[in-house]
Image (spheres, rainbow, N blue to C red):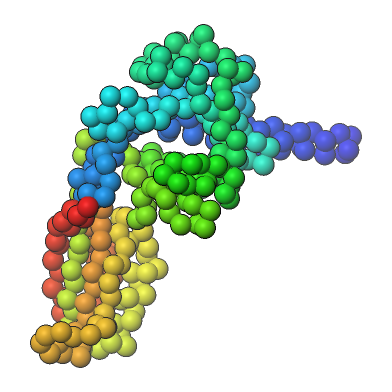
Amino acid sequence: MRRRGRLMAITLVCLGASAAQAGALDDYVRLQAGSFTSEAQAKQDARYDSITWHVAEIWNDDDANERWLYTESWMPAAPAPYMQRITRLRQEADGTISGRRYTLPEAPRFVGAWQEPAKFASLKPADLAELHGCDAVITRAGAGRFEGSTQGARCRNSYKGASYAISQSVLTADEMVNWDRGFDASGNLAWGPAAGGYRFRRVGETGACVQPVRMLVYGEIRDRKAFGAYVRAIAEAGLYAKTGGYYEAVSPALEVFEGSPPPERGVVIARFPCIEAARRFWYSPEYAEIRKLREGIAEFEVLLLPVPPVPK
């Protein structure tokens, strides 16, 4: 009886793990399906175009560990999509999701089929051409967050003189980040953005936190030793991470070009994804308690500045 109980316990654990893995695949498909645009990023950074991606699920088969997605990607004002592909997603035993990529035969006849997935009924997996070496390994990296990438230099690519391509992605409930780049045989960038991935939001989204601001803080600190408790409290509270903010610059100054700033002057520049996020930081109950630690030992001036678009 004791042995049977152990076997039953092991079986229940395995069934629970299997259900959790299947849940990861379901969650990923739910977040990935839909239409996405990088318009907000393009408005803030001229190095990026306003690209649109349409992703739809196709081929509902009987395998609970397997799903198929069709992706169609458009550049602005283009007469045809620059990319059409089908991806087979499979839940692996180790908990990861593998994404195997394929090209379509007669791809032009499937343009717009993301709106009508039934058009793929005439197409079978055997009709597809696999992009060898371009499989992505996707991992759940927290609640509602998935990270994926191709492996090494195995995804061969000849566009603009490239030798191989690397694809990295992050998918959350708020956005999809996709960073595709091509490299030559020496590892030099041949195509793709050098500054980071394309950031996509859902088409039709309203009220998104995508207009970044900078918080400029001037502080006259009279007791630096006591002020350390304030600095530690902010770090321990994790307020920046909670509101999407981060430090861009912190004094002391590397060099003074003009004027004579007093030795007790402290300067901090922090970036937030939008003014609402900065307000959530500054007016939060947590910060209201933390700011008490600097009363009587420091005087602050705090300004919010708009972040101008990055030129091309």
State left or right for residue 212 relative to residue 127.
Answer: left
Image location of residue 292, percent across then percent down: 24, 73
Q: Which of the 4 image quarters holds residue 218?
A: bottom left
Residue 146 visible to the viewer: no
Q: Which of the 4 image quarters holds residue 39?
A: top left
| Residue positioned 28% across, 67% down in the render | 248
Residue 240 visible to the viewer: yes
Image location of residue 247, percent across then percent down: 30, 67
| Residue positioned 50% across, 57% down in the render | 187
Give the total number of marks visible in the rendering. 0
Who is closer to the viewer here, 23 or 127?
A: 127
| Residue positioned 23% across, 69% down in the render | 269
Q: Is residue 225 above or below residue 23?
A: below
Q: Is residue 225 above or below residue 12?
A: below
| Residue positioned 13% across, 73% down in the render | 301
Who is closer to the viewer here, 307 or 19?
A: 307
Q: Which of the 4 image quarters holds residue 66?
A: top right
Who is closer to the viewer here, 117 or 163?
A: 163
Image location of residue 298, percent across then percent down: 19, 81
Q: Is residue 180 above or below residue 237?
A: above
- Which quadrant: the N terminus? top right
State left or right for residue 57 relative to residue 310.
Answer: right
Question: What residue occupies the far front of the structure in this picture?
Answer: 161
Question: What residue occupies the far left of the structure in this picture?
Answer: 259
Image location of residue 154, percent across then percent down: 59, 45
